[in-house]
Amino acid sequence: MAPTANSRLSPFPLRLSNNDSYIDIKPEMLNWAIQRARLGEDASQSAIIQRAHQWISGKKQPTLVQLDTFAKKVMVPFGYLFLDSPPEEPLPIADFCTFGDHPLPQPSPNLLDTIRDMQVRQDWMRDEMMGLEMEPVSFVSSIDKTATAETAAQQIRNSLGFPENWTQDCRDEDDCFTKLRQAADQLGILVFRNGVVLSFYTSILILGNLGKLVKLSIVAGTEQRSNS
């Protein structure tokens, strides 16, 4: 079984050379950190990543400062690099949807951070709504599980007040999103926009059934998650 993020860290094996502290890090942990980060072409060619490949091959060893720089570059907690094996990082919400129905073996750091950030906002939203004694919105769980995709889509459009081909009247994707956001807001849905994940246009919806996270969708990137 793979360790979790709270697994016991390995000792720091140090050796001194020319007044620098060099550290023995398992190559598999360095490889895991690089693959987990899903760096773009430019970032993959950066000096610290090229240096990390020398650490992996055993030609060189990192100093604490270099390892700290590497950890920041690949967006991994510094202490994770000292684990004996990569930790499990399950998504904090159920994984029901990805592009092509092929689940990703490892969510990216940006995706994990985005979901956690939305969960913080979710908690705030729930407290706010309960403090205002707001009623749950009526449309949550209103679609029968046996309904076809076409029927479900029509019910959603009806709730939003959209005709079937409503996108044809939009100037572009931004205009479509603006109209969708405005209609959703009228139904008591909070809509957040986040352009961090993979540097793609991203939208995140939190449906307001007393703050329940009903739908979290990352759109137009290479990762998408839905919790219904």
Image (cartoon, rainbow, N blue to C red):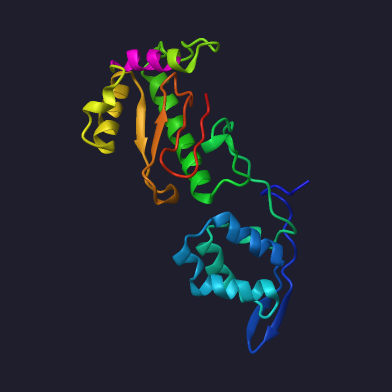
- Residue 41's x, y, as percent? 47, 64
Query: Residue at image x 54%, y 56%?
Result: 37
Query: Residue at image x 42%, y 24%?
Result: 207
Q: Is residue 128 left or right of residue 18?
A: left
Q: Nearer the viewer, residue 39 or 92?
A: 39
Query: Residue at image x 56%, y 63%?
Result: 71
> From where the camera sits, is residue 65 visible?
no
Indicate whether residue 10 is drawn in magenta: no
Q: Nearer the viewer, residue 63 or 179?
A: 179
- Residue 126's x, y, as percent? 44, 25
The picture quadrant where one finds residue 70 is bottom right
> From where the camera sits, is residue 207 visible?
yes
Query: Residue at image x 36%, y 44%?
Result: 201
- Residue 116's x, y, as percent? 50, 40
Quick check: 92 above or below 214? below
- Residue 114's x, y, as percent? 47, 43
Q: Which residues are magenta?
A: 152-161
Residue at the bottom extreme, as displayed = 18
Quick check: 62 above or below 129? below
Q: Main secondary structure of the magenta part?
A: helix
The picture quadrant where one finds residue 209 is top left
Q: Nearer the viewer, residue 123 or 195?
A: 195
Residue at the right extreme, as displayed = 1
Indicate whether residue 155 is drawn in magenta: yes
The picture quadrant where one finds residue 94 is top right
Q: How many marks can you see?
A: 0
